Image (cartoon, grey):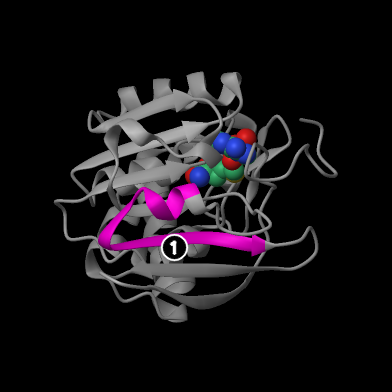
Amino acid sequence: MANYDSARARERMVQQQLRARGILDRRVLEVMAAIPRELFVSEAMAAQAYQDSPLPIGEGQTISQPYIVALMTEALHLDGDETVLEIGTGSGYQAAVLSRLAARVYTVERLPTLTRRARDILERLGCHNVIVRQGDGTLGWREFAPYDGILVTAFGPDVPPVLVDQLAIGGRLVMPVGSQGIQELVVLEKTKDAVERSTLGGVRFVPLVGRFGWERPRNNRN
Ligand code: SAH
């Protein structure tokens, strides 16, 4: 795909899928207008990279729909100096978006092949403030906690309490919660003496598989 076409496809995506549906955060819009999403999918899928849907990335997993990436990112209210944890690196696209909006990004992926691929592409794009690790993200990543933002990009039965423990006071966590058929995007905001919960509507994600997620993949090869 030529650069020119790619930039136009991105601009169209930002206008028609993000702005038109109410994404307002200027920094989120700018970053998503700049990151070449086609590099995070296979060459065979490149022409569809800016389409209004999730796309397969191998291993039974998907890169999220652009609107959902924007919605989840916006909900973190990032200013640029935050430390963010992502669970479910997948293609690495969401991590690349976060890398331009926060100071440091730690991201955990369960599957080794996807971990390696994401690490390579993030390196190639110069996202040097992202560290990718292979492991069970339902345990969080204690070493670099607390996090100002935690983003979980696979659905679980509920938010693992250990992730709430690793959230800073004033921090926000966004995660799809529910069952195979129906999930909602939950937003938690941790204050000094409470954790406030709100939702951003219905979504569909792949399952979060791990100690504090699902025991094994459902309708899913891995
Ligand atoms: N954020 C990704 C979307 C990935 S789909 C992107 O931008 O492309 C969700 C990912 O979560 C899958 O790659 C899946 O393998 C991973 N995953 C599922 N359970 C996990 C766990 N317990 N820890 C880390 N990653 C997990």
Q: Quadrant of residue 180?
A: bottom right
Q: In terms of secondary structure, what is the magenta stretch mainly?
A: strand
Quarter of the image that includes the C terminus: top right
Q: Residue at x 65, y 53 (%)?
A: 156
Q: Which residue is mark 1?
A: 72
Q: Is residue 184 above or below residue 129?
A: below
> In the rendered structure, which segment of residues is drawn in magenta?
162-177
Between 157 and 17, the one nearer to me in the picture = 157
Drawn side of residue 16 relative to residue 75, left or right: right
Residue 189 appears in view = yes
Drawn side of residue 203 relative to residue 133, left or right: right
Between 140 and 50, the one nearer to me in the picture = 140
Residue 161 sits inside the magenta stretch = no
Q: Quadrant of residue 140?
A: top left
In the image, farthest residue toward the right: 219
Q: Which three-letter amino acid code belongs to the residue tagged 1?
A: Met
Across and down, in percent, residue 164 comes to 42, 55
Residue 170 sits inside the magenta stretch = yes
